[in-house]
Image (cartoon, rainbow, N blue to C red):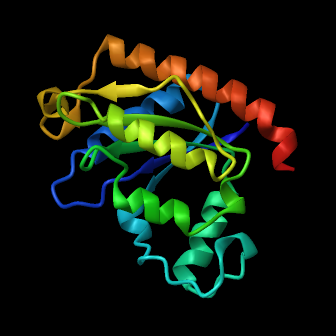
Amino acid sequence: MPRLGVVLVSVREGRVGAAVADWFAGRARGHGGFEVELMDLKAVDLPLLREANHPRLQKYTEPKTIEWSRAVSELDAFVFVSPEYNFSTPPSLVNALDHLYHEWSYKAAGLVTYGGVSGGLRAAQMTRLMLTTFKMVPLVEAVSIPFVSKLLEEGRFTGGESYDRAAHGMLDELLRWTNALAALRT
């Protein structure tokens, strides 16, 4: 069974992303197509990129980079659960992506974005562009959550039927691409 990394992108105090990531990870487990691993960039705690060598060489010297490389290498696909920062991708995700190169290649990626009126759509567009430079396949199918704070109850994301359908559709497509890209990952 392919392994899916659900990556919680926000590292801020008071973040709502943890509630959204927990909700999505539950939907992914219920989908049944993946073995699901929740990854929290706050816990990973990567410093700003300071490796001496370019990531394409995979000559890592920093212990956190070595561990991040191992964790990403073991997974077959990703879903990034991300807020929108200033119409763009959060710096924590940019940094996490930039630490590696080959470890991301030929893996499909879905996006669950959240925020205010845009629901993170602008960040999703910026992130998709960036993912292609790592030879990743960003999906068209996504989950976009506008006014996310209105969908939180006691620290849990309540979502609803439309979000559940969007998550299921994205997971179906993610599984198709993950299986199709398997030959390129070997």
Q: Nearer the viewer, residue 43 or 118?
A: 118
Image point (31%, 38%), residue name: 20
Image point (52%, 78%), residue name: 64
Q: Is residue 35 above or below residue 170?
A: below
Q: Nearer the viewer, residue 21 or 29?
A: 21
Q: Is residue 74 above or below residue 66?
A: above
Image location (x, y in percent) of residue 52? 60, 88
Residue 81 figure quarter: top left
Q: Is residue 127 left or right of residue 67?
A: left
Q: Is residue 114 visible?
A: yes
**Quadrant (top left, top right, bottom left, bottom right) of the N terminus:** top right
Q: Is residue 107 left or right of residue 148?
A: right
Q: Is residue 105 above or below residue 158?
A: below
Image location (x, y in percent) of residue 131? 57, 47
Residue 177 figure quarter: top right
Q: Is residue 17 left or right of residue 125?
A: left
Image location (x, y in percent) of residue 7? 46, 49
Q: Is residue 79 left or right of residue 137?
A: left
Image point (51%, 22%), residue name: 141
Image location (x, y in percent) of residue 73? 69, 59
Image point (27%, 23%), residue name: 159
